Image (spheres, rainbow, N blue to C red):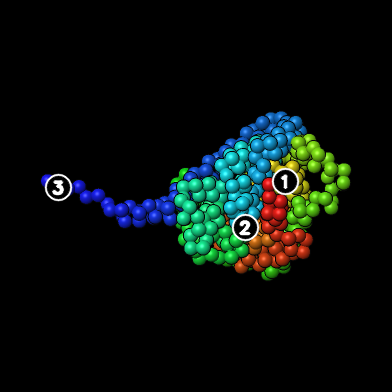
Amino acid sequence: MRIPVFPDRRALRRARRLWLHYGVVWLGAVATGLVAVMYAWLIDFGYDTFLRYTTRFWWLPLVLTPAVGALGVWITRRWFAGAEGSGIPQVIATLHDGRELGPRLLNLRILVGKIAVSFLSILGGFTIGREGPTIHVGAALMFSLRRFYPARFRSLRGVSLERKLALAGAAAGLSAAFNAPLAGVVFAIEELTRSFETRTSGVLITAIIFAGVVSLGLQGNYTYFGTINIDGHFPDLLVVAVVLLGILTGVAGGAFCWLLLNTGRWMPARLVEWRKGHPVAFGAACGLFIAVIGVVAGGHTFGSGYAEARGMLEGHSQLGVSYPLLKMASMVGSYLPGAPGGLFAPSLAIGAGIGNALHLLFGQMQLPMLIALGMVGYLAAVTQSPITSFVIVIEMINGHALVLSLMATALISSQVSKLFAPPLYEALAQRYIAKPE
């Protein structure tokens, strides 16, 4: 008679320890990848619905967008306080003090609100992206997994469990949103932590891998904006174009950051008071502002700007010199009310518009080259994270021939932007840290 062999207690404890060290994080990364893909499909569906009806009725945004603006602000303030904006400032604030701010800024309620209200906003044509919210959603999802850990695991080799989970979720969210795993790592180091922590590197990379595999499995291997075909000849004026685009995008991105961070200095005092006292009505007014700009621009300023940026890269979209200015104005109007939405995709569209406009001066240069330089320049100016910006653009467009030019443009624009305002996400994060609720 054979005696059944059962694992001893030591083996069970070891298996449980391995599960807590790795299994829970892997499971969370898979869930982050699934949510990121489903969220992308939802946003695309929402914007396609908006375009389908506004193409038939040009006047519809003048009614729909103000109503969505008011409703989005009311829902956010009523049920989802903490879900406003892109979500990256909330993640940075949580990494600063996860045990105090994390339960309020990174929870499942915020996750649901972020997805629901941003979907509502895109249905109304707001100029928002999904990448920042995906980072917030990924961080919230992974942070919520802390409840599966016993108390003795809350600090692993001096590294807070809450911090490790939030960081891994945010990086996995960016990786899945852009299909850019390297950008996820760089973003976590440069933007979220401003340092490299060897104790969290393994968890970070494995989370990005699992989320990326899920995204690849559901969406296939793709580049976000396609492939830039550039021949081996680089024009003599490339250096001039890099410097000029770096300065222009730096000024434009810095001005945008200044406008968001200093509303009390440029908005009339009565409007500031009205915004504080009647936020829902202010949201409706911003919606009307966005709608008027969109109607005047022929609908090109609505949404994230992904279609316009890709169309310019492929040579299909013929947008005027005014496009980046109108898009930036619509982007400011979309973020002033405080409804959820991201900055990455609209910033890339504005940068593409700036590069497209400069083709009038540099007609001998390849248009996709100028557009790619404009994209990386404006994104670096808004985020003031040049390394993350050029890695994101390189991975999204498969434009490896432009590596040095993209790096130089990103560096110049980020330095110029600093003359106007401090890093946007960090400045917004300080508002959560300074005034905890």
Q: What mark, if any, has residue 80 been given in the picture? A: none
SS under mark 1: helix
Left or right of 217 on screen, residue 424:
right
Residue 51 percent across, percent down from the top left: 66, 35
Front disc: 2 or 1: 2
Q: State how far apart marks 3 and 2 are (Cα).
A: 57 Å
Q: Three-letter amino acid code at disc 2?
A: His
Q: Nearer the viewer, residue 52 or 201?
A: 201
Q: Which residue is drawn at 65% across and 40% down?
A: 80
Q: Nearer the viewer, residue 336 or 363?
A: 336
Front disc: 3 or 1: 3
Q: How crowded is mark 3: few (under 14 residues within 10 Å), some or many (20 or more)?
A: few
Q: Three-letter amino acid code at disc 3?
A: Arg
Q: How crowded is mark 2: few (under 14 residues within 10 Å), some or many (20 or more)?
A: some
| First in residue order: circle 3 vs circle 2 | 3
Residue position marked by numbered label 2 in the rendering: 96
Residue position marked by numbered label 3 in the rendering: 2
Residue 292 percent across, percent down from the top left: 78, 38
Q: State how far apart marks 2 and 1 are (Cα).
A: 24 Å
| First in residue order: circle 3 vs circle 1 | 3
Residue position marked by numbered label 1 in the rendering: 335
Q: State how far apart marks 3 and 1 are (Cα).
A: 70 Å
Q: Which of 403 and 176 is in front in this view?
A: 176
Residue 18 lies in quadrant: bottom left
Residue 36 percent across, percent down from the top left: 54, 45
Q: Residue at x 52, y 43 (%)?
A: 35
